[in-house]
Image (cartoon, grey):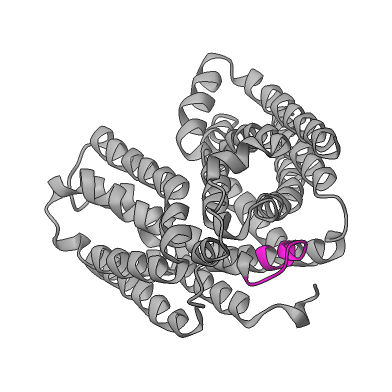
């Protein structure tokens, strides 16, 4: 499927993702807000932020069920309405409510994201989903390029304005996309066909290749998210300025914006297993390159290699999992993949920093080895699928 044949719904949802990413300020600045205007200690703020990670994972793993069971349209609209109003209320909420309120907001955000991804997947045929997913990721990355500096400018005026703007943007996106969302419920369609639809666990047990692939997704995300945990520490401890770390992230985002959609179009007919395995291997190699003596050139080289791997595997792996899903389980498969592919938000920090504190030089070859093992697991999954 080329860009001319991408359904209008995919473009609408991608536009919504762009606007949402542009205004995702709470995710970026929550720690600063809690330790600043809310006067929490760093440790207490860390616990609150950790709770948002729990809400994110729970929303990813369970949010798809609500969409599959009751329809992705009503679930998306309800989650975004409550989430937008809750975000607007943050500046006036008592600090003690954050321990529960923040994870709930992240749960709603993850649920909304799962239903958005499921609707985009159901809008296209199996085999053509890589293109639509690449468009969505490109839109989201473009928003994240614009969002942080815009959020910083708003903070200079008012912390209250930051959350009000984000909440109103969530509500605005909700009302903009609502007219384009289909009302069909795949679960009810399957049930009306005369047989009880196959459940999630039964479908997964029947797909041994996918069950082999899921642990590899978790391992690679654990490696990939070292970019946000131990890589900045490594660069700082090697005497490099913070500007280098910021530049590396800009390089990665720029490569994704330029290349992800063209690469997805060029490779859309090739085996997903080979592309995912190559991507995992490149991510591992990229992080292993951080073990070289640190310089601007070596750091940029490592970033280019690991971002090349990300461009290959993220779009393809997402589409691969969704293509394996029956239509009435697309939301739960989307949530399953999203949960596995964001597990690093909980695991990368404690695991990576523990290894780095004990043996800094050991972390990078271990990341390389983990990436290669994940690639080998994907190739083994291909053999199972063929069998």
Q: Residue at x 16, y 48 (%)?
A: 97
- Front in this rendered view, residue 333 or 50: 333
In magenta stretch: residue 346: no
Quadrant placement of the N terminus: bottom right
Q: Residue at x 82, y 47 (%)?
A: 275
Quadrant of the image occupied by residue 207:
top right
Left or right, 259 with respect to 340, comes to right
Left or right, 208 with respect to 342, comes to right
Q: Residue at x 54, y 65 (%)?
A: 186
Q: Position of residue 266 (x, y in %)?
A: 86, 64
Q: What is the residue that sits farthest to the front in this orientation? A: 194
Q: Is residue 289 visible?
A: yes
Q: Position of residue 141 (x, y in %)?
A: 59, 63
- Front in this rendered view, residue 247 or 377: 377
Q: Residue at x 55, y 53 (%)?
A: 197
Left or right, 233 with respect to 169, comes to right
Q: What is the residue that sits farthest to the top in this orientation? A: 358
- Front in this rendered view, residue 308 or 78: 78
Q: What is the residue that sits farthest to the bottom in this orientation? A: 179
Q: Is residue 224 visible?
A: no
Q: Position of residue 308 (x, y in %)?
A: 76, 50
Quadrant of the image occupied by residue 222:
top right
- Front in this rendered view, residue 200 or 244: 200
Quadrant placement of the C terminus: top right
Quick check: 311 above or below 206? below
Q: Position of residue 179 (x, y in %)?
A: 46, 85
Quadrant of the image occupied by residue 133:
bottom right
Left or right, 106 with respect to 194, comes to left
* Magenta extent: 123-133
Quick check: 118 above or below 96? below
């Amino acid at each position: 499927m080329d860009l001319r044949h991408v359904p209008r719904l995919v473009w609408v949802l991608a536009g919504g993702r762009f606007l949402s990413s542009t205004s995702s300020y709470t995710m970026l600045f929550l720690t600063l807000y809690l330790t600043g205007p809310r006067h929490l200690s760093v440790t207490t703020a860390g616990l609150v932020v950790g709770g948002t990670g729990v809400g994110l994972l729970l929303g990813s793993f369970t949010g798809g069920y609500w969409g599959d069971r009751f329809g992705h349209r009503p679930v998306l609209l309800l989650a975004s309405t409550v989430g937008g109003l809750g975000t607007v209320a943050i500046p006036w909420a008592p600090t003690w409510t954050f321990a529960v309120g923040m994870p709930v907001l992240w749960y709603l955000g993850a649920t909304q994201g799962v239903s958005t991804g499921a609707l985009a997947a159901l809008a296209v045929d199996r085999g053509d989903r890589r293109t639509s997913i690449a468009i969505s990721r490109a839109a989201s990355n473009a928003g994240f390029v614009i969002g942080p500096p815009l959020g910083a400018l708003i903070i200079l005026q008012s912390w209250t304005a930051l959350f009000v703007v984000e909440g109103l943007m969530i509500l605005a996106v909700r009302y903009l996309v609502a007219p384009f969302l289909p009302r069909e419920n795949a679960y009810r369609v399957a049930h009306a066909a005369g047989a009880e639809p196959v459940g999630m666990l039964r479908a997964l047990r029947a797909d041994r290749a996918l069950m082999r692939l899921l642990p590899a997704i978790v391992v690679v995300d654990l490696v990939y998210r070292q970019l946000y945990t131990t890589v900045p520490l490594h660069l700082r401890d090697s005497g490099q300025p913070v500007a280098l770390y910021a530049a590396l992230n800009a390089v990665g985002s720029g490569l994704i914006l330029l290349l992800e959609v063209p690469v997805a179009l060029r490779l859309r007919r090739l085996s997903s297993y080979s592309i995912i395995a190559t991507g995992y291997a490149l991510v591992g190699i990229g992080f292993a390159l951080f073990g070289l003596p640190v310089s601007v050139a070596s750091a940029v080289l490592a970033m280019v290699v690991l971002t090349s791997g990300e461009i290959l595997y993220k779009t393809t792996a997402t589409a691969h999992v969704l293509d394996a899903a029956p239509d009435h389980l697309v939301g739960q498969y989307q949530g399953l993949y999203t949960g596995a592919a964001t597990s690093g938000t909980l695991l990368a920090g404690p695991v990576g920093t523990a290894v780095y504190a004990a043996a800094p030089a050991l972390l990078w070859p271990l990341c390389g080895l983990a990436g290669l093992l994940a690639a080998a697991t994907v190739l083994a999954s291909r053999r199972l699928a063929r069998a």
